[in-house]
Amino acid sequence: MRLVSFKPLWVAACILIAACSSQRVVPESLEPLVDRTVGFRELLTDPESYQGRVVVLGGVILKAKRLKAGTQIELLQLPLDTRERPILDRRQSQGRFLAIQQEFLDPATIVEGSTMTIAGEVSGGKTDYLDDVEYRYPVVIIKHLHPWPAPSYDNPQSRPRFSIGLGGGTGVGLGGGGGFAIGF
């Protein structure tokens, strides 16, 4: 009986996993400028004290409107997962923020309810009305925005999937077998 070494297969699997998980949301050129120590709660409390810092925020789009000097996007902040994609549980939100695109971005192309991750420079805060109450929004100037495709339960390609399977067995008589598979 000959034993098959699975070491080369494990090495290949690790390389494939690393390749699939290394897609960058924040461009490499912008990464050194990002201050990942600033949490959204601190930013919400005192946005002026973080003015000029580059942060990464994510959320679900609530609305967008055209300004004289760009486009304003209002987002419900959501925590980011390890891939910097907003977690789709609105109950985990810590508030709202405004993201300003200084070039024209047609508000009709910004889909309410979709998610995005933004790397932006904090420019302070803006007080506006949220329904009948004044609300203090942290404001970031967009340096890079990454829209995420909406999840679709009809399209099996819409959600990332990864699986590894191992199998083995013996047969009656002289047979035996084993297997290894990687799926994406």
Image: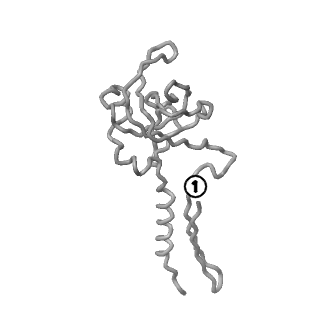
Q: Tell me what residue is drawn at x 55 percent, y 63 percent.
A: 164
Which sits in the foreground, 169 or 118?
118
Identify the residue at the far left of this view: 49
Instruction: Please name whichever residue, 182 or 48, is drawn nearer the observer in this view of the structure.
Output: 48
Q: Measured from the top left, where is residue 159 in percent x and y?
A: 59, 49
Specify whether residue 86 is in view. Answer: no
User: Quick check: 147 left or right of 118?
Assistant: right
Q: In x, y percent, where is residue 125?
A: 39, 24
Q: Nearer the viewer, residue 23 or 9?
A: 23
Pinpoint residue 93: horizontal percent, then vertical percent.
46, 31
Q: Is residue 21 left or right of residue 114?
A: left
**Category of crowding for the residue at label 1, using alpha-carbon neighbours closer than 10 angstroms: few (below 14), some (14–19), many (at least 20):** few
Where, by quadrant of the figure, is residue 169 drawn? bottom right
Residue 70, compared with residue 86, is above or below; it is above
The coloring applied to the image is one colour
Quadrant where the C terminus sits is: bottom right
For the residue labelled by badge 1, is the local secondary structure a helix, a strand or a loop?
Answer: loop
Question: Residue at label 1?
Answer: 161
**In the picture, which quadrant includes the N terminus?**
bottom right
Q: Residue furthest right?
A: 154
Q: Is residue 173 above or below residue 109?
A: below
Q: Position of residue 167 (x, y in %)?
A: 58, 70
* Depicted 27 relative to depicted 137: above or below: below
Total marks in image: 1
Residue 131 in view of the camera: yes
Q: Which amino acid, mark 1?
A: Arg
Which residue is nearer to you in this view: 137 or 31? 31
Residue at 44% across, 47% down: 26
